[in-house]
Amino acid sequence: MARNSDTIDRFIAAWSKKDVDLIMSFFTQDAVYINVPIEPPNVGQEMIRKTIDGFVGMAEAIEFRVHHQGESPKGVVLNERTDRFKIGGRWVEAGVVGVFELEGDKIKAWRDYFDLAQFTKAMTGGA
């Protein structure tokens, strides 16, 4: 049952390597990735890659710290985490809840829920 959680653990670890090809290897060709407060959804590998390129390109380092993770009987993985991006020599953090639906050993759908205003404030150096 925890097979999907193991896949997500490897996916989360891949972010710290900042290797976009490695990160993209976890997605199905027709995957959907949604940062819920941001439009539009990223549909398909090309759109997802552009978004991930943006995150990787802006950050000197990336850490996703998982606090809690569980897997439903249907194999959906949910995690609560802090996503950290080192930008301009300082860490910017966002509290996130991620929902991952897998097809085989690949991510078919990924939705992240977070407070966009809080993240924007952190990006601009607000308290």
Image: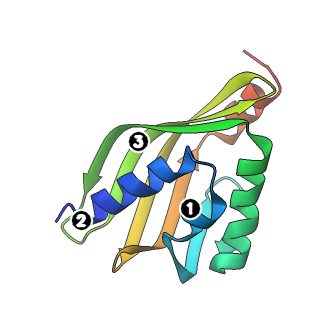
Q: Residue at x 65, y 61 (%)?
A: 20
Residue 41 can be seen in this image: no
* Numbered badge on residue 3: 2
Identify residue for label 1: 23
Q: Horizontally, is 3 left or right of 101 in the view?
A: left
Residue 102, horizontal then vertical, whole percent: 38, 73
Q: Residue at x 80, y 20 (%)?
A: 125
**Mark 3 or mark 2, which is nearer to you?**
2
Q: Residue at x 56, y 63 (%)?
A: 22
* Numbered badge on residue 80: 3
Residue 77 can be seen in this image: yes
Residue 16, horizontal then vertical, whole percent: 55, 43
Residue 81, horizontal then vertical, whole percent: 45, 39
Task: Name the one closer to the observer, 20 or 103.
Answer: 20
**Residue type at numbered disc 1:** Ile
Q: Say what secondary structure mark 3 lies in.
A: strand
N-terminal of the pair, mark 3 or mark 1, is: 1
